[in-house]
Structure formats: C-alpha cells, structure tokens
C-alpha cells in the first residue's frame, strides 16, 4: 500500500542479468528514500524444460533424476545469488528478504504482487532471454506493466 510517506514494500524480480542488477540498484535508492522493505524473487521457469513424456521406464527415471538434479543445482545457485544481494541491502540499512519460486515468470510475479501486498515493482526491461536484444521491451516486463495491480518501474 502506498502511504503518504510513499512505498512500503517493493518487489524486485531478479534473474542475475545486467538489467535486474540495475533494477535492484534503483530499488535500493527508492527504498532508502521511503524507508521501504525490498522483496527479491527469482523464478525457476521449469515450463521450458520438457517432461520425460513417452520415454520408456528406465529412460524416464534417468531423465527425471537429471531434471531434479538440474533443478536442485539451479535453486542452490539462486539462493547463493539472492543471499549475496540481501547482504548488500542489509549493509545499506534496508530490510530485505527473498524467495525462489517455480513457474512462468510473469504469472509468478503477478501472484507475488497480490500475495505480498506489493506497492511498487522495479524490474529490468529484459531478462536473460537470448532474444531480448531484438525486442523493444521484454515480454515479462511488458506483461507486468500491463497487468500489475500496483505501479511498475522498468529499469534498463
């Protein structure tokens, strides 16, 4: 909720890209001005990984085990990355927390806005997608800017 003193809770979707780094820097500055807390999220987009589907028994087990190992490694790396960013926030005197979510990035960001009573979203104009250079605005950023129930600041 935006109060007369400004924003209280700022969401920063963070994927490690230079755009999300810039968004975090911007969110830290806004947070200092309004004494707002930061909520960083990273989304593991498992929708782009195909399921074992019609593979035979042993192949399916091997594929599932490999998928779980990749997911675990990715989650561990995300925890390390976000813990580092939270430390930076704390050193700046900002209350901050993080979460790692699984799903379609734009859907999970929109759900987080509602679930966590977010007042402002600060996100990068593009993520780690290989096609971001040919778009005027990343698809996730565009969708959030159109559908969010709170103000959205897009940083690039």
Image (cartoon, rainbow, N blue to C red):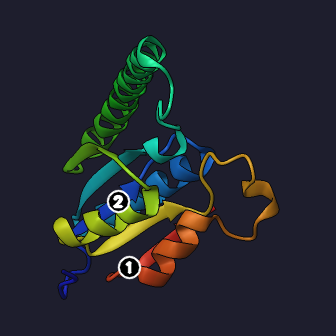
Q: Residue at x 47, y 30 (%)?
A: 52
Is 57 left, or right, of 100 in this rendering? right
**Mark with earlier residue (1, 2):** 2
Q: Looking at the image, can residue 19 be seen?
A: yes
Q: Which residue is mark 1?
A: 148
Q: Nearer the viewer, mark 1 or mark 2?
A: 2
Question: What crowding class fits label 2: few (fewer than 14 Cα within 10 Å), some (14-19), or many (20 or more)?
Answer: some
Q: Residue at x 50, y 57 (%)?
A: 23
Give me the C-alpha separation between circle 1 and circle 2. Answer: 11 Å
Q: Quadrant of the N terminus?
A: bottom left
Q: Position of residue 141 (x, y in %)?
A: 54, 68
Q: Residue at x 47, y 35 (%)?
A: 51
Say the numbered circle drawn on residue 103: none
Vertical comparison of 12 with 154: above or below: above
State the residue lying farthest toward the bottom: 4
Q: Are marks 1 and 2 in contact (CB under 8 Å)?
A: no
Question: What crowding class fits label 1: few (fewer than 14 Cα within 10 Å), some (14-19), or many (20 or more)?
Answer: some
Is 26 left, or right, of 93 in this rendering? right
Q: Looking at the image, can residue 45 be seen?
A: no
SS for dot 2: helix
Closest to the observer, 135 or 84 = 135
Q: Position of residue 83 (x, y in %)?
A: 30, 31
Q: Quadrant of residue 89?
A: top left
Q: Position of residue 102 (x, y in %)?
A: 34, 45
SS for dot 1: loop
State the residue lying farthest toward the right: 134
Q: Residue at x 29, y 39 (%)?
A: 86
Closest to the observer, 1 or 76 = 76
Q: Which residue is mark 2?
A: 108
Vertical comparison of 77 with 85: above or below: above
């Amino acid at each position: 909720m935006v109060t007369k003193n400004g924003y209280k809770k700022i969401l920063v979707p963070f994927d490690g890209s230079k755009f999300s780094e810039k968004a975090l820097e911007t969110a830290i500055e806004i947070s200092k001005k309004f004494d707002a807390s930061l909520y960083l999220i990273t989304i593991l987009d498992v929708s782009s990984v195909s399921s074992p589907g019609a593979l035979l028994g042993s192949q399916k087990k091997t594929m599932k085990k490999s998928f779980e190992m990749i997911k675990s490694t990715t989650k561990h790396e995300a925890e390390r990355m976000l813990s580092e960013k939270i430390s930076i926030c704390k050193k700046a005197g900002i209350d901050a927390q993080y979460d790692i979510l699984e799903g379609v990035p734009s859907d999970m960001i929109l759900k987080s806005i509602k679930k966590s009573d977010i007042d402002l979203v600060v996100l990068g104009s593009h993520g780690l997608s290989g096609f971001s250079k040919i778009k005027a605005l990343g698809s996730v950023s565009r969708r959030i800017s159109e559908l969010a129930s709170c103000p959205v600041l897009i940083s690039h």
